[in-house]
Image (cartoon, rainbow, N blue to C red):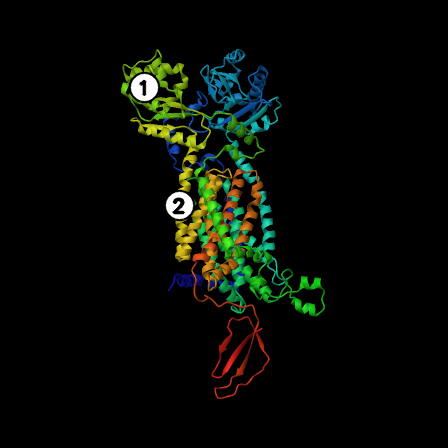
Amino acid sequence: MNFTRIYKRWEDALGQPFIKYGSLVSRYPWHILIACVIINCLLGIGLVRLQIETDSEITYTPKNAQSITDRAIINSIFTEDKSGTNFYTKSLTWNSHYADIIIKTRNDSNILAPRYLDEIERIYNFIMHSINITTDNATSSLVNICALRNGNCVVEGDVVFSRAFRTAMESNTISFPLFNFEYLSWTFGDPQVSESYLVSAKMVRLVFYLRQDTETAKELSSAWEKKLPQMLGRFPSIMDIAFSTSRSLDDELEKSVFGDVPLFGFCIAMMLVYAGFAMSGGDCVSDRQNLGRAGVLATCFAILGSFGFVSAIGVKFVLVVAALPFLIIGIGLDDMFILISCLADCSSAQQSTLEDRMMETMRTGGVAITITSITDFLAFAVGATTPIMVVSHFCVYAGTAVIFCYLNQLAFFVPCMVINERRMARNDHCGTCRPIKPREELRAEGKSICYTFCCGGQPPRTRRDNESPLEHYVKIPFQYIVQNTYGKVTITVLFIVYLAATVYGIMNFKRGLRYSYLSDPDSYLYTYNTLFENHFSWEFAIGFTITSAQNYSDASTQSRIFEMLSNAKADDDINQAIAYDWLTDYKKSIFYNDVSERSFIAGLKTFLIIRKDHANDIVINSEETNIVAARFYVLTKDLPGSDQQGNVMLRMRDVAYNSPLPVVCFSWPFIFFEEYVYSFQITFTTVGMAIAAMFVVTIIFMPHPLLVACVTVTMVMICAGMFGLMYYWDLTLNAITMIEIIMSIGFSVDFSAHICHAYITVDGATRKERVHNAINRTGGPIINAAISSIIGILILAFSSSYIFQSFFKLMFLVMVLGIGHALLLLPVLFSLVGPVTEVPLTPTPTDKKVYAKTISMPTDNQTNTTYKSEPTELGNVSMILRNDSSNKHTVITQL
């Protein structure tokens, strides 16, 4: 027995539950439909428990990342918040509350001029004194809530207001990057340097840090940050002002995503229009526009129920989930088109009753949509295991929505199919649901053409009667191309070019995410991020913390410390000229004493009174006999790229790991670098697991070696194409695109599974015939599902959100690639090496009318006699002659 017949028997076994359900729903459609609506609405109540998580650190940092563990260790050692007494950014373990201001000249002239510095100082004074917060009848300005050092507000870049800087500016002797022990590299945008002196710059950057050492300070700082954009946005100045705060990214992410949520309503309207148009055709009885709209409503109820259910069980809503409804609608319409196509295959001669037609529809269509729904769900289930919250929570919402969408197609749309079939059987009008006459009768009665067209019709008798123009005509070009020799050659060449472009794109693949992508181009944050990313260097301090007590007066301990710092500064991305090393500075001071550990500590305490910049980095026990822990820092060079940032983190960790001392390497930006570093690993691990899961599902539901190979290879090719073609669309691998790649795995299986399933189940004595029939059955649904999905996400292309735009780009890619592989590559492959049976699996219906009469035939000794009788119309059958009894036969005549 060949694999095709094994597959047929296995599919028959799989179809038995669906046959029973088809019988059930054909008898109780209204009961099932009403129950479905009630359950979805009750689950939708769970949305009252919806919790939104907008903290970018929580959502984008992998759970149990090393930086999270390292920060916890450091925070357990350095427990005191110094933002109200002795604030230094290098010792931060979190992204401190701040206001970051970039001031630039409008004509890009040199900002190192007295009139520009005067204007910058006026802006500075406005920020310090004129943005006030009123609480409990008390008014607070920035001077009351700013982070402090030596009793003064900490403002990075305020060196430009010093007399020394003014004097050096007038004499063109501003040393760069160090000026009077102040590091200027991150203060000036587009600096021009000659012989180590700063000669010009186009921008100045001021960073105002806020206190966080008390709950009151936190509340005031948060309120002040919120007010800053409102006040500074209206400030009149001869210069351009760009600004950002520590809360701006989260605020803008929420605004940009939820600001586009009204697009979902427009998407629903478009889907209702398209689904109705795609189902239009036939006459006033056979028209199925309302059935198409029911498919959209089924998906909407699925979104309501699934979101309510997931919210009720406490899964937080991350902002990326806002793009999910646009995608679920496409999945729902894909299932809808498949079910309708399978119903169209059920001719009235083979299934004489509605129950028979629904049983056959569910046997074929139920299995088909189950395969794709399971593959989609498994792709998201695998994605839900990823340690990045924005990915895992999206996949939980998406996987649940896929299951609800599948169940709603069975419990909402299938009953609607039954109700529609009953309407057609009664010959009721599709709009008014009132009985009407066939158009032939109306014409015979002399009715007008307009009346006949608008008020006449009859149930469909063939598949062609059931198909709309969008179902029938769109598949014809594909049927022709894949059967034509020139078409096959062209398809082969196109896919070779596609693979070459994919390989090149993968070789140039990039990872990371620019902050400017996450904000609306019209927002203040986008302006700030664009200026910062393009015109300022980004250097940061990396701390090496010795986490246990050591004998620091011992020469061997000091040697190990200096060796560790030397190894760190030997890295190409580390600034060799600058380090924050309290031990070296202490040894150079007059207070240094290494006679004993106690005398070492006594001299160190006196040294720290003068050098408070080191005071935050040393922890001495209460007896003053040991240094419990200590920190040392190196400074990176300008690292604009995500790859550079992530790689330097890994290399510095290696330096700490290879030190004989117990060292933890940490810098607060490491929290965000974790995503850059591990997104690549996490993505490929997740994709590999998902592909393996898809492989197993394909074996279970389509146990034919060729089909399993075709689906798997297609899936791998589409996933590789997604990675490769991202390069041409200027997309990088990050947590957001990771979600879309995981989605593409499920979608890449859908269309190829439909065509494979159709090829193995349709009739046809030759490969050419079976390819033709397979495209005839699934070509229309595949194309319409892809078009509906593209229409659903098309409006995302006009969104101001990077999240929505990237969703559009990658979903458009996967739809185009899915159609190309399912309706071009696989049919060509099947036409060459596809499995084929000698006899049809099911009788092939004919559209011709046949007539029968029963006659007495002469025996062997009787003379031939011609008998005439009036024929009786039976309908459409496939047999030409059927024996009845000994000498009586039923003669079937085609007319």
- In-front residue for pair 785/199: 199
Q: What element does badge 1 sit on?
A: loop
Q: Quadrant of the C terminus?
A: bottom right
Residue with the most extreme front position: 486
Q: Nearer the viewer, mark 1 or mark 2?
A: 2
- In-front residue for pair 629/219: 629
At label 1, counting other C-alpha atoms closer than 10 Å, the crowd grade (few under 14, some 14-19, many 20 or more) is some
- Compared with 288, 892 (above or below) is below
Marks 1 and 2 sit apart, C-alpha to C-alpha, by 55 Å
Residue 442 in the image, given as x and y percentages of width and height: 68, 68
**Residue 30 appears in view:** no
Q: Earlier in the sequence, mark 1 or mark 2?
A: 1
- Compared with 435, 221 (above or below) is above
The amino acid marked with disc number 1 is: Glu
Mark 1–mark 2 contact, CB under 8 Å? no
**Residue 84 appears in view:** yes
The amino acid marked with disc number 2 is: Gly
Residue 170 in the image, given as x and y percentages of width and height: 54, 11
At label 2, counting other C-alpha atoms closer than 10 Å, the crowd grade (few under 14, some 14-19, many 20 or more) is some
Residue 463 in the image, given as x and y percentages of width and height: 56, 63
User: 263 left or right of 604?
Assistant: right
Q: Kindly identify which residue carries mark 1.
A: 624
Q: What element does badge 2 sit on?
A: helix
Q: Quadrant of the N terminus?
A: bottom left
- In-front residue for pair 771/330: 771
User: Which residue is located at x 53 percent, y 71 percent?
Assistant: 877
Q: Kindly identify which residue carries mark 2.
A: 688
- In-front residue for pair 749/125: 749
